[in-house]
């Protein structure tokens, strides 16, 4: 086949090039797999197919990889560049085993060679098929597509074609470890077949179930039967009625995945993303592909910024060669036409509360367990709802608890949670978020709200999808609750479940924030919101952006944080292109500022990255407010305040890290000539004081809220929790009005509630401890704020 006449190959190549779109994963196999182009590369593909090899050739040409039609030279001989694994009947080709065995023998006898076997699978159709009797009986070996079917695939499915490269296998390493006889050649071929089978599962997912049959299986399970009996007894209805109620719950909850719907969604979303985004950047996806290849049960747990989140992650995963997950969506989204579309795209619907409905909670939990047992990846939003402030919300642990409970039923594959950070340069709902925080009731999702969203489609800048450090739940449970595999009595919740789930969920939020995507808009918003009158000369704004990028690059928060590899001028230009700033020009140059509306809305984008700058902002505040501050005093201050910051912003450091972290930031401040080191104390460079002032302002809103709560606890210890929350929130809002601050943190009740919980956890809620905290905070407050808080406390409660 590879020796066809050149004119035939040229015509065939032109046909393939016309019908295919040429997508490949990963984007750069040479870099991601560290391929050595000075050593031989041999491609292993599943079956004998001219269309596959020609498509591979086009991909290799674009990627800078060797041409599969050219022979590979090693040991002074020419060898075939492509190894075909199976014949037309799906049986392993004997000549391929001989090819492997011969190559292994050469590498065993001469260690100067190191050929790399690169598995490549080409997908023309990612329809998983439906379960059948054959599947239940063990199935039949799948046969490769014949000439007619392959021709049909090229013509009608060519635009969906995906070339999926896998990490190479070193023949040198294998020959040295395993040997080079024919038995090892057979083993290599067998491992390759398993690998391709797993790649197929990753790309298409399990075969689609018969939905009605799955419902009958679930209703017949012992757990749901018991819940039905209890429902009948509690509500004094017959079992048939209770069973019908359980069936209705399943119909309300369950997804109805459709491959046709997925293809349509891909086409629509490709058009939408190209229309509204300048680009979608995906980072660290290689870790997820590796987990999938290793057979992990993957749970995607993103932050929740926008309704776009549901669509964006599925789209990204599909284009990374993985099947989109089943998504836990709020039942509020189950309206026509969005509900049926989401359901057929893999969404399953969940009510906001299960309280008082044991039958519903049992049905939902068993359905979730069924998804895991069938091998579907799942996505849920641990925050429970969209963040209105741009910060991460405290986690809701219900879905994670049900995931762990599903593991207790004997799930064999390891379960791994993949944190996902979404970064946007424009979120269409931001305007409504702030209105809701100020008391406006949330608009109900409907067909009309959908049309309203469509009207808002415009330039959204860049979108960012960053995959964070995965959490292996099995390993986490082994550490947190070594006895977790011991099954409790039926119906009893293990004592370790709640604390273990809380610990894992908090680590999840930390890992999400550790994968933050920094962009020009977030940086510009952070700076302008800190500036007096919310405006700065362009040159000063560029210098401040450069300062922040230096801090993020030189004192890296984590390996997963991403920052565009462009200079500060380019970052600012990208932000300006989003049409969110007012730009005025005079004889001295441009002044960039925010109008009244954007002063409110851009807080959301600042809060996306505030956790990356909060520690240097606190250090800058301490340096500015204390005329003579020694290192030991700074570290002591950080160690006292850090637990509150960590709890609010899900920071990755421990209190014990504060000493080293302070040193690193102080060294960077000195390198940037912001301060000078005078032994154990520090002096601020007077000419650069303004840059430290802008940085310090990032911490002021946190300091305001901490000081208000500490003062209330110190001066009014008799207050009940509800009254304390109300007064703290009212005090923050009054302070915001007095000092012309319009930020969502001052209006979000959940942030205030969480802060009070953190203060109690740290043992600072008694009057004496709160008084000490307030004294620590007072010198750090901006001019006039301390006086305002003092006056607020003199008002009638």
Image (cartoon, rainbow, N blue to C red):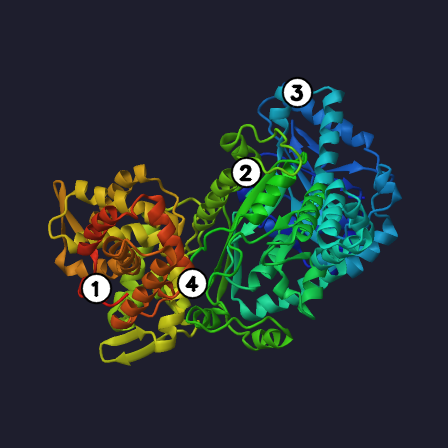
Is 75 or 681 nearer to us in this picture? 681
Q: Of label 3 and label 1, which has the lower sequence position? A: 3
User: Callout 3: 10 Å neighbours few (<14), some, many (20+)?
Assistant: some
Q: CA distance from mark 3 to mark 1?
A: 72 Å
Q: Residue furthest front?
A: 236
Where's the N terminus, which quadrant?
top right
The image quadrant of residue 261 is bottom right
User: Callout 4: 10 Å neighbours few (<14), some, many (20+)?
Assistant: many
Q: CA distance from mark 2 to mark 3?
A: 44 Å
Element carrying mark 2 = helix
In this orientation, does residue 38 appear?
no
Residue hosting label 4:
389
Q: Is residue 144 above or below residue 574?
A: above
Residue hosting label 1:
785
Image depth: mark 3 or mark 1 in front: 1
Residue hosting label 3:
178
Element carrying mark 1 = helix
Residue hosting label 2:
497
């Amino acid at each position: 086949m590879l020796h066809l006449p050149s004119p035939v190959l040229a015509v065939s190549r032109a046909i393939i090039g016309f019908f295919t779109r040429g997508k490949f994963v990963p984007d750069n196999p040479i870099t991601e797999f560290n391929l050595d182009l000075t050593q031989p590369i041999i491609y292993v593909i599943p079956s004998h197919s001219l269309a596959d090899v020609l498509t591979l050739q086009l991909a290799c040409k674009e990627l800078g990889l060797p041409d599969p039609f050219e022979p590979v030279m090693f040991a002074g001989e020419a060898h075939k560049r492509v190894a075909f694994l199976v014949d037309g009947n799906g049986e392993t080709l004997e000549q391929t085993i001989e090819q492997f065995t011969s190559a292994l023998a050469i590498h065993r006898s001469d260690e100067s060679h190191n050929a790399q076997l690169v598995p490549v699978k080409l997908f023309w159709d990612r329809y998983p098929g439906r379960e059948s009797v054959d599947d239940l009986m063990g199935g039949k070996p799948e046969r490769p597509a014949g000439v007619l079917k392959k021709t049909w695939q090229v013509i009608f499915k060519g635009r969906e074609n995906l070339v999926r490269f896998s990490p190479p296998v070193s023949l040198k390493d294998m020959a040295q470890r395993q040997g080079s006889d024919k038995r090892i050649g057979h083993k290599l071929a067998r491992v390759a077949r398993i690998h391709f089978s797993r790649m197929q599962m990753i790309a298409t997912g399990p075969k689609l179930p018969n939905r009605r049959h799955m419902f009958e299986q679930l209703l017949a399970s012992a757990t749901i039967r018991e819940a039905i009996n209890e429902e009948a007894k509690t509500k004094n209805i017959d079992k048939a009625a209770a069973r019908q109620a359980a069936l209705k719950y399943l119909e309300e909850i369950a997804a109805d995945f459709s491959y046709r719907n997925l293809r349509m969604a891909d086409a629509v979303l490709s058009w939408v993303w190209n229309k509204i985004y300048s680009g979608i950047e995906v980072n660290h996806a290689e870790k997820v592909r590796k987990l999938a290849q290793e057979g992990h049960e993957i749970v995607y747990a993103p932050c929740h910024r926008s309704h776009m989140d549901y669509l964006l992650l599925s789209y990204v995963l599909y284009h990374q060669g993985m099947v989109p997950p089943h998504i836990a969506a709020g039942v509020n989204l189950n309206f026509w036409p969005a509900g049926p579309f989401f359901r057929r795209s893999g969404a399953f619907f969940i009510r906001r509360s299960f309280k008082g409905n044991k039958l519903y909670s049992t049905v939902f939990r068993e359905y979730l367990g069924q998804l895991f047992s069938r091998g579907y990846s799942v996505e849920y939003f641990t925050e429970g709802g969209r963040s209105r402030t741009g910060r991460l919300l405290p986690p809701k642990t219900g879905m994670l608890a049900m995931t762990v409970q599903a593991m207790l039923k004997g799930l064999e594959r390891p379960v791994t949670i993949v944190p996902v950070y979404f970064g946007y340069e424009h979120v269409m709902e931001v305007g409504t978020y702030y209105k809701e925080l100020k008391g406006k009731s949330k608009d109900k999702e409907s067909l009309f709200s959908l049309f309203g969203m469509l009207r808002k489609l415009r330039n959204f800048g860049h979108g960012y999808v960053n995959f964070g450090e995965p959490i292996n739940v099995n390993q986490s449970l082994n550490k947190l609750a070594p006895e977790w595999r011991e099954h409790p009595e039926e119906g009893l919740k293990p004592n370790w479940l709640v604390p273990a789930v809380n610990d894992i969920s908090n680590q999840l939020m930390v890992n999400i924030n550790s994968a933050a995507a920094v962009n020009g808009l977030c940086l510009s918003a952070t700076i302008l919101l800190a500036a007096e009158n919310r405006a700065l000369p362009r040159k000063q704004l560029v210098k401040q952006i450069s300062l922040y990028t230096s801090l993020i690059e030189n004192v890296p928060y984590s390996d997963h944080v991403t920052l565009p590899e462009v200079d500060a001028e380019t970052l600012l230009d990208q932000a300006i292109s989003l049409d969110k700033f007012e730009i005025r020009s005079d004889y001295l140059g441009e002044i960039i500022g925010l109008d009244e509306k954007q002063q409110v809305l851009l807080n959301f984008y600042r809060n996306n990255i505030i956790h990356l700058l909060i520690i240097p902002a606190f250090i800058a505040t301490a340096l500015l407010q204390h005329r003579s501050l020694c290192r030991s005093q700074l570290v002591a201050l950080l160690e006292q305040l850090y637990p509150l910051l960590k709890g609010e912003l899900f920071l990755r450091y421990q209190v014990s890290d504060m000493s080293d972290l302070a040193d690193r930031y102080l060294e960077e401040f000195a390198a940037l000539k912001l301060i000078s080191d005078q032994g154990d104390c520090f002096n601020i460079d007077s000419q650069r004081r303004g840059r430290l002032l802008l940085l310090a302002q990032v911490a002021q809103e946190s300091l305001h809220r901490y000081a208000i709560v500490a003062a209330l606890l110190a001066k009014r210890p008799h207050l009940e929790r509800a009254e304390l929350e109300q007064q703290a929130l009212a005090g923050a809002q009054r302070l915001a009005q007095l000092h012309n601050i319009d930020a969502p943190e001052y209006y979000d009740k959940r942030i205030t509630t969480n802060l009070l919980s953190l203060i109690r956890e740290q043992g600072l809620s008694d009057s004496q401890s709160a008084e000490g905290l307030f004294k620590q905070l007072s010198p750090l407050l901006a001019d006039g704020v301390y006086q305002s808080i003092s006056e607020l406390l003199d008002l009638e409660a």
